[in-house]
Amino acid sequence: MDKVLLVDCCLRGEQSRTAKLLEAFAEALPSSVETETLVLEEENLACLTGAYLAQRQRLLAEGSLDHPRFRYARQFAEADVVCIAAPFWDLSFPALLKVYIEQISVDGITFGSRHGGLEGLCRGRALVFLTTRGGVYTGDPMEMGSRYLDALHSFFGFARYDCIAADGMDMSRYDTQAVLEEAKEKVRILVRQLF
């Protein structure tokens, strides 16, 4: 049975347009998959600083990869498909998602350090990023969120990366509802391709 991890970094609750894309993804999933949803706002995530960082380094040096501290990394590494939903903020995504990425970037779980370099250890076949943007940033070098996650998919060992973005959501010349509906249809098509 396929495992799907939905990572929700949609910080505006029901008013979030990005959450509507994530909802479309979840609704399109076949009933045969096992789905876990991680709402980042509900987690007690902390930046890697001070004593918290020192504890992490000590656990890694001891090889204590089964410590509860690494549960997010294990959950991420064990998923067949990971779908991350986050809005476009400050040319990237909310800082909370970066904090989560710090938690899942664990040598020995999601990637490995070898003599020949780094290798991804995740078993997943696809990392999907869903986002909404106020302006039009698809293909724009100023957009850093999707580019960052695209690099991470290789770093972690995922076979493919897909980004579906609803651009122009705050621009008066765009029919934002139509843009959102078009993006939701792209989400449904992608789910059919993945499963």
Image: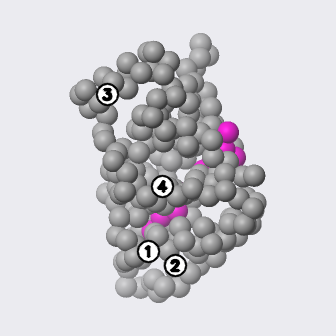
Q: Secondary structure at mark 3?
A: helix
Which residue carries the number 2 mark? 180
Measuring 56% from the left and 81% from the top, which residue is drawn there? 181
Mark 1–mark 2 CB contact (< 8 Å): yes
Q: Residue 38: give its label.
A: 4
Within 10 Å of the Cα at label 1, are there few (<14), some (14-19), or many (20+) other Cα atoms?
A: many
Q: CA distance from mark 1 to mark 2?
A: 8 Å
Q: For residue 174, what is the image quadrant?
A: bottom left
Mark 2–mark 4 CB contact (< 8 Å): no
Q: Residue 53: give its label.
A: 3
Q: Residue 9: give its label.
A: none
Nearer mark to the viewer, of 1 and 2: 1
Which residue carries the number 1 mark? 17
Nearer mark to the viewer, of 3 and 2: 3
Q: Position of residue 134 (x, y in %)?
A: 38, 71
Which amino acid lies under the numbered mark 1 shown in the image of this protein?
Arg
Quadrant of the drawing holding the C terminus: bottom right
Q: What segment is highlighted magenta in the picture?
A: 123-132
